[in-house]
Image (cartoon, rainbow, N blue to C red):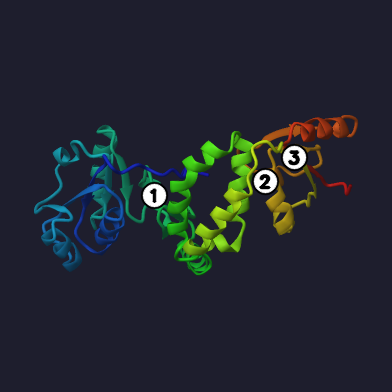
Amino acid sequence: MQFFPIYLDTTQTAVLVVGGGEAATRKVELMLKTAAKVTVVSPQLSPALTQLHQQNHINHIAGTYQKSQLKDKQLVFVAADDNELNKIIREDARHSAVLVNVVDSPTHCDFITPSIVDRSPLTFAICSEGQSPVLVRYWRARLEALVPQGLGLVARFAGEKRQQVRQLLDSITKRRNFWEHFFSSKRSEDLEQAKILFDQLIGQQDNDQPVKGELYVVTAPDHPDFLTLVALRNMQKADIALYDNTVSPLVLELIRRDSERELVDDQNIEAKIDTYIKQGLRVCYLSTKPK
């Protein structure tokens, strides 16, 4: 992974876009979906950028690029149709500690912008590190069709209810179980149904009831493509994953990121499982050998 995916808080971010054509327009429109302040430097602007400037959505410097324009900026997009100028801006930006994106030139970028499926505050970012833009567009189209349009509203609703759940349920495990139960239901994809479901689940909670441990046994294939959907879900639910030395590292990569992982052997596996189950943990045991 050459480019590490992160989400940047743009409430205090100032962005410079060099260029006023089609490529610059795409970057400006993308950044205007955020809280960033955008300045465009170009002698001329595309019709779309002209309209955005007239509506006071962007600042416009009607001239050519100068290094001083990088002052107080955090990001710069270089969309000028001039390779020599692109190199100059790239060097200026790096000397000024400003992250630079040279449009359509990943090798000259400190950061790149992924293809986005937007269900704010829920977003999906897809990137091929510039290697296969057609493949990215294909998977974005598939995700657009799969992800319900109203899922962002459900995400906001869940955010509003987090404090209520935190006050009601006294452990991380109980809260995690609650939200997993909530989001695994098809009813949580529609806001009105999600509200009804939430009230029903809240009414079923009992803090005095101890958390029960669970065991999921996964017969690991040689390649992650052959994992069943049930196996993948169990790997994602586990609080701790126990595995032997026959399991492929590629399969282990699909275990939930924040779960503990422990290499075990046949001599201690049963005792380990029993200990963790008694602690109320969800244990996933992976091996290529069927159990």
Label 3 crowding class (10 Å Cα cut-off): few <14, some 14-19, many 20+? few
Please state which amino acid type lies under the numbered disc 3.
Lys
At horizontal 82% and vertical 35% (from top left) the residue drawn is 273
Mark 3–mark 2 CB contact (< 8 Å): no
Residue ID at (59%, 34%): 170
Say which mark, if any, is on residue 212.
3
Q: Which percent across, then down, holds residue 81?
A: 24, 58
Mark linked to residue 112: 1
**Residue under label 2:** 237
**In the foreground, 113 or 149:** 149
What residue do we see at 18% from left, 56% from top?
Answer: 57
Residue 265 in view here: no
What's the distance in space between the residues labelled 2 and 1, CA to CA?
Answer: 32 Å
Residue 262 badge: none
User: Which of the two marks, 3 or 2, is nearer to us in this view?
Assistant: 3
Q: Which of disc 1 and disc 2 is earlier in sequence?
A: 1
Direction from residue 190 to residue 209 in the image, left or right: right
Label 2 crowd (10 A; few <14 / some 14-19 / many >=20): many
Mark 3 to mark 2 CA distance (whole Å):
14 Å
Give SS at disc 2.
Answer: helix
* Mark toward the viewer: 2 or 1: 2
* Residue type marked 1: Ile
Q: Is residue 1 left or right of residue 252?
A: left
How many other residues sit within 10 Å of disc 1, few (<14), some (14-19) or many (≥20)? many
Direction from residue 25 to residue 148 in the image, left or right: right
Q: Secondary structure at mark 1?
A: loop
Name the residue nearer the viewer: 285 or 71: 285
Q: Are marks 2 and 1 in contact (CB under 8 Å)?
A: no
> Which amino acid type is marked by label 2?
Lys
The alpha-carbon separation of the residues under discs 3 and 1 comes to 45 Å
Q: Is residue 277 visible?
A: yes
